[in-house]
Amino acid sequence: AQSVTQLGSHVSVSEGALVLLRCNYSSSVPPYLFWYVQYPNQGLQLLLKYTSAATLVKGINGFEAEFKKSETSFHLTKPSAHMSDAAEYFCAVSSTGANSKLTFGKGITLSVRP
Amino acid sequence: KAGVTQTPRYLIKTRGQQVTLSCSPISGHRSVSWYQQTPGQGLQFLFEYFSETQRNKGNFPGRFSGRQFSNSRSEMNVSTLELGDSALYLCATAEGWTNTGELFFGEGSRLTVL
């Protein structure tokens, strides 16, 4: 079985500050890892994904994430927060295999202060 | 290319009623997944269909059911509604199996059960 843990439900940063959203996963096989973003009153949108290629993955809107097998982590970062980054962020894990499905974490709400 | 379309966007039902939600995928997408989103539980996987076959199912009671048609459109049904079924129901589609690819989400159907 696979699972994702996103510590904390809310993160608040100042505009221009570093954004760090944490994600730890559990998987018995090599995982695929994803970060999705959900803006108010919208569906989710893929930010980036790790599928066993480079461990540092770059996504849209300046976000990136690093896969660390030893720490079972896939934290999301952005060097400088923008007001438009305020949204809910979900980490998700899946794996290869006929019966694998995408499992989401509970999400983290990012607030950006002016 | 048109996005994922979910109908209806909002609906209000009373306990004991049943509801049917519809999802029209992006053209060419053969996989449709359904998720229930609530503030306390995040995104909970309901089921996934691929080429009209249910490929995966989450841990929901039998009151929750779904199907996929030959044109890849999907419906989900909830019978004997309970207050706890109030949620945002999200549909996500993909070209292939959802565990390895990018999911495209609709804006959701917000169900309120009174």
Image (cartoon, rainbow, N blue to C red):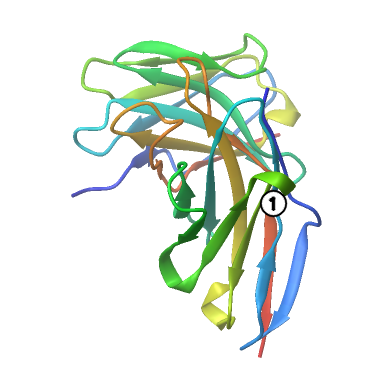
Image-quadrant location for residue B85: top right
Name the foreground residue: B97 vs B74: B97
Residue at horizontal 60 percent and vertical 68 percent from the top = A77
Q: Does the image show residue A102?
A: no
The image shows residue B14, relative to residue A14, as above or below, that is above
Residue at horizontal 44 percent and vertical 35 percent from the top = B91
- Where is residue B75? Give x, y as percent: 40, 22
Q: Does the image show residue A21?
A: yes
Q: Which residue is mark 1?
A: A23
Q: Is residue B111 left or right of residue A44?
A: right
Q: Residue furthest right?
A: A8
- Where is residue B54? Give x, y as percent: 43, 12
Image-quadrant location for residue A5: top right
Residue at horizontal 45 percent and vertical 42 percent from the top = A51
Q: Quadrant of the C terminus of chain A?
A: bottom right
Name the foreground residue: B9 vs A66: A66
Q: Is residue A101 left or right of residue A70?
A: left
Tell me the kind of residue under disc 1. Cys
The image shows residue A85, relative to residue B40, as above or below, that is below
The image shows residue B24, relative to residue B5, as above or below, that is above
Q: Chain of mark 1?
A: A
Residue at horizontal 47 percent and vertical 19 percent from the top = A97
Q: Residues within 10 Å of mark 1 (few under 14, many from 20)?
A: many
Q: Quadrant of the N terminus of chain A?
A: top right
- Where is residue B66? Give x, y as percent: 46, 16
Q: Is residue A96 left or right of residue A110?
A: left
Name the foreground residue: A40 vs A37: A37
Label 1 sits on a secondary structure element that is loop
